[in-house]
Image: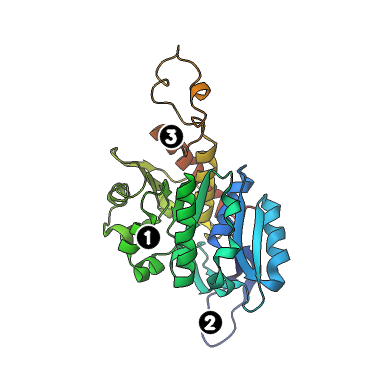
Amino acid sequence: MINDVLVKPLDGVTPDSDTRATISARPGGAAANQAAWMAHLGADVVFAGRTGARDVAYHQRELARAGVRARLAADREAETGSIVIMVEPDGERTMFTDRGANLRLRRADVPTRLLDGAAALHLTGYTFCEPPLLDVALWLLGQARARGLAVTIDPGSAAFLARMGPTAFLRWTEGAAVCFPNRDEAAVLTGETDPAAMAARLTRHYGVVVVKLGGAGCVLAVPGEPPVPIDVHPARATDTTGAGDAFCGAFMSRWLATPAADPVTASDPTASDPTASDPTASDPTAASLTTADLTAAAEVAVRGAATGVTRFGARPV
């Protein structure tokens, strides 16, 4: 969990003096933002995290507004993580991060019963970047794989990826159903400069790769097929904070809601209902969706990101 402090200068910044600005406090945190967007768009979402003791009720309330069921551990020694975000006139932003109680997340904060009945486990790269958190991330991955759950990954930060090492990150997250790097993160992970080449190379490790390109849309790739560029959805950017989170949340909501095609019966109009013989056929984590289905999810994600940048703050409500 994160407390976002948004700072938008009203004039040019005056060094060594005062600058008029609009300043507001909002709930944040990449995984929490993604959960909020997913729930807002109709998915059933449970979020687990850690916050300072005095902020537990606030963050539970804010996640509930979007429809998220939150399980928050109260830390009585560390404050909730905070980010000061300076928003430029064009909506781009610079962030100053203090991760606070996030760095003290433990296995007990994420009981395995939360995975019972789940379709997918979603993690951000921030959970891999410090030794205590890495233990939790790898443990959760093991629990998900033992249950046959799909795993989805948002790498989160190019700077953190470079520090932890792309080889290690790829090894830890190998086989995830979907990976959502942005352009900078994909460059760190692959060493490539072209987004299509980045996406194609990452399909060696993941079932679906969606490289987020900000104002240029995204590139979707699946193993063995040419990458598919998805155009940007026009929007007037006010604040790009959380645009990638809105993208992930929108994609996952559509992906999880799309019935998977049965490869044998899909082309046979006389065949019986595929779900009658295969109870997992309506679950996109149990069978491959078509490229057209995934492209549709990416288009929904691009529209979700465009909606997100038109407001201040990273949440839908």
Tag 1 near tag 2, CB within 8 Å:
no
Residue drawn at (63%, 69%) of the image? 51
Instruction: Indicate which disc residue 287 carries.
Output: 3
Task: Report crowding for label 1: few under 14, some 14 to 19, many 20 or more residues within 10 A (C-alpha).
Answer: many
Which residue is at a point 51% across and 45% down the rendered structure image?
A: 252
Of the 4 image quadrants, the one containing the N terminus is bottom right
| Foreground disc of the pair 1, 2 | 1
Place of residue 198 in the rendered image (x, y in percent of width and height, measured from the top left) = 30, 52
Task: Name the N-terminal-most of marks 2 and 3.
Answer: 2
Q: CA distance from mark 2 to mark 3?
A: 56 Å
Q: Residue at x 59, y 64 (%)?
A: 108
Residue 62 circle label = none
Q: Return the residue at label 2.
A: 14
Where disc 1 sits, the SS reads helix
**Can the viewer see residue 238 in this picture?**
no
Label 2 amino acid?
Thr
Residue 81 in percent (x, y) is at 58, 72
Of labels 1 and 2, earlier in sequence is: 2
Q: How many marks?
A: 3
Q: Is residue 135 left or right of residue 315?
A: left
Nearer the observer, disc 3 or disc 1?
A: 3
Q: Which residue is mark 1?
A: 185
